[in-house]
Amino acid sequence: MKAAVYHGRQDLRVEEVPEKELKDNEVMIQVKYCGVCGTDIHIFNGDGGAFEVNPPLIPGHEFSGVVVKTGSKVTAVKVGDRVSGDPNDTCGECYYCKTGKEHFCTGMVGVGTTVDGAFAEYVVMREKQVYKFSEDLSFIEAAMAEPISCCLNGIDLCNIEVGSTVLVIGGGPIGMIMLQLAKHAGASKLILSEPVEEKREQALKLGATKVINPLEEDAQEVLDAYCKNVDVVIECVGNIHTQEQAVQLAGKAATVMFFGLAAPEDSFPLKPDDVFKKELKITSSFINPYTFERAIAVLESKSIDLESLITNVVPLENIVDVFTKPEYRRTGKVMIQVS
């Protein structure tokens, strides 16, 4: 089969690889679409992702497709089913799995990070990781189930209440999803800080009540004039400068969510006195525990606008361009069309 194989830092090649043999509890899926995630960019640049990456490896973990083969003990899905898949496969036996913290599983298998993923014609995963979706949902929409599931975990941890004021930093696809989820969670004032004008305009269409250009405006002055207190800040850039800014702009008793993934060695100075005087809760969101079923439900409800977020569809043969050409960094979500 054809696949994009990561061989090391900034070395991704489309080549022929053998299909994987199925175990009795596994499912083979013909991939239709697979989204390019920030984690994939980190892997390409040699930074790794949520888990340690050992090349050669086929990345890709945000996908949809059709079941084409099942193991002898598989009963939940059948050939022809339209499916997406949770890439994180837990052991169910370690301390964290047994205490309701399965996303910290010590035996975690990550499709697209620790084992071969979905930048390929076929991907194989255990039956328990596979989720069916209806014909009301397109394949390209269903490929967004994994990022939606991660965002749901993040939004749950933000403690948004009806009437909250929420600031989202970064207007990429994740920031736009978080903006919409915050609105559904009850936020009354939704603010986006984003330097790209087109993304600010898009945010207003998606429910933002205020936008800030951080390159031309003083964000703190804008916030002081617009609201009494910023209750939640969701940082979706994954940059130490915007993460530092998130702490600075947070209001009294606010929750600061570091959702963006910064490089592992990056850091910034944090003054404990600032945290103390504002009684901040600084948190983050690690992968997607217990949220994949909800993500499918959210997608099927059509309550999240995805169409405007997916700006590029690129064939698998041209996937390297997505990682090497800077114009793709300035757009929205990139989908790799496999079949």
Image (cartoon, rainbow, N blue to C red):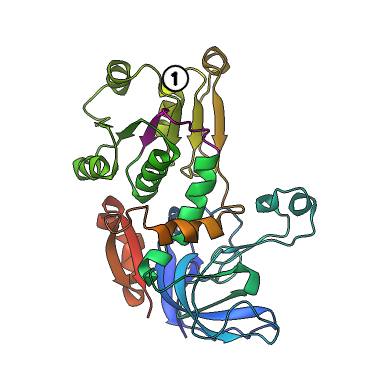
Which quadrant would residue 57 be assigned to in this image?
bottom right
Relative to residue 64, is residue 200 drawn left or right? Answer: left
Residue 12 magenta: no
User: How far across and down, in percent of the image, does residue 199 sit?
Assistant: 24, 44
Q: Quadrant of the C terminus?
A: bottom left
The kind of residue on which mark 1 rests is Gly
In the displayed structure, 41 sits above or below 242; it is: below
Residue at image point 49% right, 57% down: 295
Residue 159 magenta: yes
Would you call the spot at circle 1 few (<14 residues within 10 Å), some (14-19), or many (20 or more)? Answer: many
SS category of the residue bearing label 1: loop
User: How far across and down, in percent of the image, does residue 181 sit?
Assistant: 42, 44
User: How far across and down, in percent of the image, does residue 201 sit?
Assistant: 20, 42
Residue at image point 56% right, 18% down: 279
Residue at image point 66% right, 81% down: 74
In the displayed structure, 312 sits above or below 68; it is: above
Which quadrant would residue 75 be assigned to in this image?
bottom right
The residue stretch that appears in magenta: 157-169
User: How far across and down, in percent of the image, does residue 338 sit?
Assistant: 38, 77
**Numbered marks: total:** 1
Relative to residue 307, is residue 148 drawn left or right? Answer: right
- Kindly tell me whether residue 39 is visible in this rendering: no
- Kindly tell me whether residue 235 is visible in this rendering: yes
Question: Mainly helix, strand or loop, the magenta region?
Answer: loop
Badge 1 is on which residue?
A: 251
